[in-house]
Image (cartoon, rainbow, N blue to C red):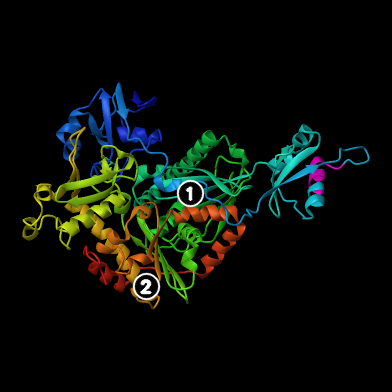
Amino acid sequence: MEIKVLPDLTITADSDETLMDALVRHRLSVQNVCNGKGTCGKCKVRISGRVPQPTERDRKHLNETELAAGIRLACAVIPENGMIIELDVVDKLDRKEAALLGMKAATLDPGVKKVFLTLSKPTLADERGDWDRTVDELINVTGKNIVASSLNVIGKAPEVIRADNYTLTATVTDREILDIEAGDTRSTLFGAAVDIGTTSVAVALVDLLQGTVLKVVSTENEQTAYGADVISRISFASESRQNAVLLQNAIRRTINRLLNELNLKTNVNLKDIIKMTIVGNTTMHHLFTGLDVSHLAVAPFVSVCNRPLQFSAHELSLDVNPQAKVFLLPNIGSFVGGDTLGAVLGAPEVLEPGNHLLIDLGTNCELFLKTNDTMVACSTAAGPAFEGAGITNGMRARKGAIESITLSEQGVSCRVIGGQTPIGICGSGLIEGIDEMRRTGVINAQGRIGDPEAISNLPIELQRRIRGTEKGNEFVLAYGLDQGRDITITQKDIAAFQYAKGAVCAGIKTLVEMAGLAVSDLDSVILAGTFATYLKAENILNIGLVPNIPPERIKAVGNAAHMGAIRALLDDRELAFAEELYRKIRHIELGGSVTFSDYFTDSMYLERLD
Ligand code: FES
């Protein structure tokens, strides 16, 4: 049967699959936090045309207004002919990515260059082969013994050298001829830097001649259809080889989709992309390359490979020049990936003299500590709350997300991305909202909403926004307009947040202690990651996301991991430096640490922590 997906797509669906299955099979992105088990309530779609009766699962997660508006859970819908589906629209350019546009190289030495060659024509007295003639001239011009190449490139020689009167351009590294093109093409040389996040993926197109970032695009990682975090993806991939291939294809498709978007937006021919760098956590690294992730999930949590890796684009099925060099930054440990090394390259101030802590906030929070004596790194599983997932009205930081909240006697004032009607709350909004609720007494230090002792002291406008539900109390941030759905922070959301922030704070304390320091010895705390840019130091200190240090020592640096990937693209010395760091950084596993467990319990309170 056929289903229309707005605005202009028609897909087929089988009678033995759910709407979610059909959407995933057609590579359409739909939130799928619980993997179709019916517990998360996130896979909402709007159905018109032939609207099915609500199922029990729909009734559990959707209110009457939503049901009347045709909203259903995709994992509970049996497709029928004539259905018209509306999916959530993903904002293509993430706020963080805008900061990378126009970024210019401090140093430029990408390790690939173009060399223009004019060949002598063959004669009976000079009957050297076409490729031999090309290589001889290249050695003559460069003075370097560059001879290695692929059969594909060698095979192009007869056509290329004759296409423009025996003139051609060779794209080379110090050892290898990556491509040959007819005539003089020295004015174009491009690279792409990729940040594979668990939730979103970003690709930057970089001019390797000028050293500038031309365009950055990002989108949701297609793997999210198979699970929200690294643990659920590892478990899915470990079930069968077929599942692992599904995840591998999903991330490769996501990257190729972004590359093609870059092509459309810039007119740069993807075949002119000759170098790529990739950062990601260890799980993303393995799923992308097709390495087995099953041992990552069980003690002693062993990866297949942490060393720096290099492949051709052809081997990785990437839609750029098939001979393009693709570099994967090394992983530091099983849950501390090349994205952490990328973040160190992207925020080099963390390596300055003194004691500096870098925190890459995300579902899997990675910590890197550099002291005057050592460099150590660890990870702590914060869960998806910071990314707006696993939160009742949580969403990514895109249009319609509440990003900032102020509580006062007059009630609640929200700033919404895009200035439109709010449809959810993103990580920065959640943190500010919880701090405001704490400050005004809507919640106490234990995180309890509407403590009877405190509630009578609240302004009336705040009191009336606290309401009881069968799942516990909740606080209304914004009353629903269009579909009548209110945006709330629930008791369960606060518990999820306390878990996340407790894990981060305990990780910091444990790592600092293992390095022989006290938190007060830290000269700076550098926050990296998508939403960290939008956090206020006072908020994160007030709720104890980081231990109590002077706010002026806290600095946000944006998506440092992607910046690091761009730096490594622009300068091979950065790649070499990443390799040097990989050998020097000591990985610490917090899993069995009693200190971590003790700190974790103490770090759940929503108050400044010493
Ligand atoms: S309720 Fe449908 S995917 Fe979770």
Tell me the residue at 16%/47% (across/down): 411
Q: How crowded is mark 2: few (under 14 residues within 10 Å), some or many (20 or more)?
A: many
| Residue 33 vertical placement versus 578 (above, below) | above
Name the residue type under label 2: Val
Alpha carbon separation for disc pair 1 and 2:
31 Å
The amino acid on which the numbered mark 1 sits, given as a three-letter code, is Leu
Say which residue label 1 marks.
Answer: 100
Which is more N-terminal, label 2 or label 1? 1
Please indicate, yes or no, whether residue 511 appears anywhere in the rendered image: yes
What number is the disc on residue 512? 2
Question: SS at mark 2?
Answer: helix
Highlighted range, magenta: 128-136
Residue 580 higher or lower than 57, as above or below? below
Q: Which of 330 and 525 is in front in this view?
A: 525
Q: Quadrant of ligand 1?
A: top left
Query: Between 442 and 92, which is closer to the camera in this rendering?
Result: 442
Label 1 beta carbon within 8 A of ligand 1: no
Q: Crowdedness of circle 1 by 10 Å Cα count: few (<14), some, many (20+)?
A: many
Query: Mostly what secondary structure, the magenta segment?
Result: helix
